[in-house]
Amino acid sequence: MIPDNSEDAGRRYCQLRLDAATASGPPHFDYQPLPPRHIRIIELQPGERSDPFRARFIVGSLDEPFEYDGLSYMWGDAAPVDRVVVDGAVIPIAWNLARALEYLRDNMNPEPLRIWIDAICINQHDDAERANQVGLMRLLYRKAECVRIWINEPDLDEESEALAALRKFQVREEEQKFGLGDDPDFWDPILPILENEYWSRAWIQQEIINARFLILHCMNASVIGTTVFEFRRAVELHLTRFIGVYLNISVYVKLWHSDRSPKAQEMFAFHGEARQRYKLIHLLHDKEGLLVSREHDRFYAIMHLAKDYRDGDLAVDYTKSLEQVMVDVATHHISRHQDLEFLLQSFPPIEDYLDSCEGLARPSWIPNCWLGRKDTGAVIASRGMIYSQCSHKSIDMSTMRLSVRGIKIDRLRKLFKSEQIFREMTVVQFWASALGQHLQPYMSDNAAGLPHDIYYTLSSYWLLEDFDHEFLKAALAYLYELNQVAELTNINIVEGNQALLPGWNDNTHAILQQFLIHVSIHNFTLTDKGSFGLTPRSNIREEDEVWMVLGCPHPIVLRQRDDGAYSYVCPAIITGLTDSLMEHEDFEKFTRETQPGEKIGEWRMEDIELV
């Protein structure tokens, strides 16, 4: 057991090992090419804390019995601080890996440790070898006897009761708290593990999911991976049971939903047989916040997790640009599914972004989240989607243009924009906004009420088929009544005491909160034909065209360029337009068999290119 976990002590011993390894004057390691489907592992020899790390390489085939462990860790600062002497030559290693080897060697003493470590076992200066090894990653982690997670948290209280309880934790579904106990603060000592930046790494998705057996190491402490999963599941069950109930559950939320951990901790739920639930494009969107050292790994780190990806579908190639890699992803999706569903994830968030991008390599139709850029709006999702198929050969790889076939159904005439965030508005500010002014004529006693397309679009974020739209009508009616009482118009919609009028209840409050969040992350529009619509917050403009294209389940907004091609702007929900199309007697002609120039009711089928 290592008695001093402090960083100062760790760096002091790094220097001692480095000095000892350097004194013997070994050369830098010269990697030799690997045979196909072979990997290197190191056999780390036992030693004291101050002894240099000494190891030998063992080369083995993944197609034959081969015993080794795998290391899952965060690279962190790549500056070398220590060395491993491998077969008489040195390989520099960075701080976090030095810490991992220090503690793992101590944990295994007096036995050697056979383990695969990417920074050592892959020639990091050879892109071809790196690409080949990345292609083997899923198999590599599946074949490992054990995957060892390393988390560097020197402040962990290794003697705490919470850590001892975590080591043997089991969900007790018969208990109200599922085994978590009555005092959530009891678990505070393990928060350093749950909040560590390790959970932000993209690569751990593969490493955790494909492992046959997991052990989490944090300093001198070791925890079986399944108990971490059990703990995570108990917290999720507790939150799910009490969601919507007036209960202080923030202490449990911090255990499950820290700002760094959720994306990767969720993957514990997919460990084993439950893996590969999602399409590749959904994983790219959901995991966009994870950390990578090379941008290409935004895809390569998760490709093997997708249910629609098979080994060899796409070659790992670090010589391509990130944009070219993502065009490959889109091409793969289209060939598999004959649809353009990924367009629902795509919308440029920056004002005048499309104009500034002319001449650049990035296609306008590639989702920002695929490239690691944060979206400012929300992905479109609703009921009433139109399903059709596009050509499986829709992308020109040389120009990165997307060819689509569809019909131009309308044009944007008016945008309901607000400089102020809706959920921060007072009652009077909401009804004075462009959206509020558009809704007001439908709210008076003499009005017939909200038209179907407005009302449906405003509630599109409720995806439940049995959602009672009367809830939204009642909430908006209550908000309108507040605006008729002078002394109530300046209260904050979300935080004010709206119970001053009859009709207020918790359901009204919840509906209004969700509605205001919804309108804060979307734009609302009116088309030339008078249809009310919704788009993500994006660079839409008046006069942009609205199209329905084969393979995309919602209308899309496009902007024509001087050369006749189109820039992609964003998806849209425009209920009036889609309803009229679906109800038309010629709707059955909206297929890829219909040729350019042929009519579908009042609309003409066209082939266009998106740049």
Image (tube, rainbow, N blue to C red):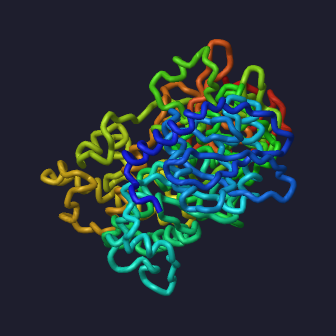
Please determine whether, in this image, residue 81 is positioned above or below residue 271.
above
* Residue 212 visible: yes
Image spot of residue 324 (x, y percent): 70, 28
Residue 507, by quadrant, is bottom left
Left or right? Give the position of 37 relative to 434. right
Q: Residue at x 69, y 42 (%)?
A: 121
Q: Residue furthest front?
A: 24
Residue 445, by quadrant, is bottom left
Q: Residue at x 76, y 51 (%)?
A: 308
Image spot of residue 373 (x, y percent): 52, 34
Q: Residue at x 47, y 41 (%)?
A: 16
Along the viewing direction, whichever of 72 and 352 lies nearer the viewer:
72
Q: Residue at x 37, y 64 (%)?
A: 157
Q: Total number of numbered labels?
A: 0
Image spot of residue 420 (x, y percent): 30, 37
Residue 522, by quadrant, is top left
Please determine whether, in this image, residue 565 is positioned above or below residue 473.
above
Image spot of residue 578 (x, y percent): 63, 45
Left or right? Give the position of 31 relative to 295. right
Quarter of the C terminus within the rendering: top right
Along the viewing direction, whichever of 510 and 95 lies nearer the viewer:
95
Left or right? Give the position of 63 relative to 188. right
